Amino acid sequence: MAKRPYRGKAKSKSPKANNMMAQFQQMQQDMAAAQAALENETVTVTSGGGAVTVVITGHQRVKSIEIEPDLLTPEDVDFLQDMIVAAVNSAIEQSQALSAERMEGITGDMGGLNDMLGGLGLG
């Protein structure tokens, strides 16, 4: 016996499901826009009382490192290296916080989705 193709109407999604899908698609667009914007946002961090300055983007890319010329003596190399490491690490942490803040602003509106994921043990 051959199977006949189904010719009935496709079931329509509930308005709630359509609304949630629209919210999810909007969130995806907003997240993509925020990620693109983070590339142009920067965080500036100093260490050693302003002796070393690091500028980093929201994508954790170091844009510049400035060093006070007075620190450029052979005796201060170890100290200078430590300050650069501290400044870069601090800049990365602040850049990550900036990114998380921007994403939270987008995903925080998704109460229905968060509730649903929580019910699935995913949220």
Image (cartoon, helix red, strand yellow):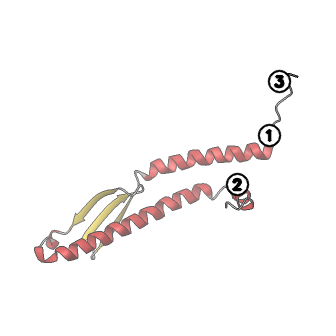
Q: CA distance from mark 1 to mark 3?
A: 22 Å
Location of residue 123 by image quarter: bottom right
Q: Amino acid at mark 1?
A: Lys
* Residue position marked by numbered label 2 in the rendering: 113
Residue at (70% x, 44% y) in the render:
21
Q: Earlier in the sequence, mark 1 or mark 3?
A: 3
Residue appearing at x 28%, y 58% in the figure:
64
Measure how far apart labels 1 and 2 are at the Cα level: 16 Å
Q: Name which residue lies at 57% across and 44% down.
A: 29
- Three-letter code for the amino acid on which mark 3 is drawn: Pro
Is residue 51 visible in the rendered image? The answer is: no
Quarter of image, res 109: bottom right
Element type where label 2 sits in the image: helix
Query: Residue beneath label 1, please?
Result: 13
Amino acid, disc 2? Leu
Whether 88 is drawn above or below 16: the answer is below
57 relative to 52 in the view: left or right: right
> On the rendered structure, is 62 left or right of 109?
left
Task: List the single residue furthest toward the front.
Answer: 1
Residue 5, label in figure: 3
- Front label number (1 vs 3): 3
Q: Which mark is first along the chain, 2 or 1?
A: 1
